[in-house]
Amino acid sequence: MYLSAHKTTKKLGISSDTLRRWLKQGKISAKTSPSGTRLYDISSFFPELITQNDTSTTSITEKKARQ
């Protein structure tokens, strides 16, 4: 699932600086849309979301807490 930077930072509970750093470090992947917007692939960061098809903030927070 690809999201804008704003939505990605909200879903993951991180700052935009952290998101840029993770992109540079290869911890999260992104692509650029035809309009030039960078879209971040949170499913590559949270592979368990692919099988569950659940990207709610609550689910991500619960998964972080369990780890």
Image (cartoon, helix red, strand yellow):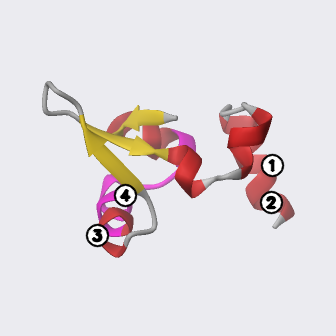
For mark 1, what is the residue?
62
Please report the residue visible at 44 percent of the width from the left and 59 percent of the height from the top.
28
Q: Which labelled disc corresponds to residue 24?
A: 3
The answer to which of 63 and 31 lies nearer the viewer is 31
Judged from the image, the secondary structure of the residue bearing numbered disc 4 is helix
Distance, label 3 to label 2, CA atoms, is 26 Å
Please, what is the three-letter code of the amino acid marked with disc 2?
Ala
Instruction: Tell me which residue sits at (68%, 41%) in the image.
Output: 50
Query: Which residue in the protein does label 2 denote?
Result: 65
The mark nearer the N terminus, 3 or 4, is 4
Examine the image and state in which quarter residue 67 appears: bottom right
Dot 1 amino acid type: Glu
Of pointers 3 and 2, the one earlier in the residue sequence:
3
Residue behind mark 4: 19
Horizontally, residue 3 falls left or right of residue 11, namely: left
Residue 40: x and y in percent read: 39, 44
Q: Are marks 2 and 1 in contact (CB under 8 Å)?
A: yes
Indicate whether residue 41 is drawn in magenta. no
Q: Position of residue 34 (x, y in %)?
A: 16, 27
Please give left or right for residue 60 compared with residue 7 in the image.
Answer: right
**Magenta stretch, residue numbers:** 11-21
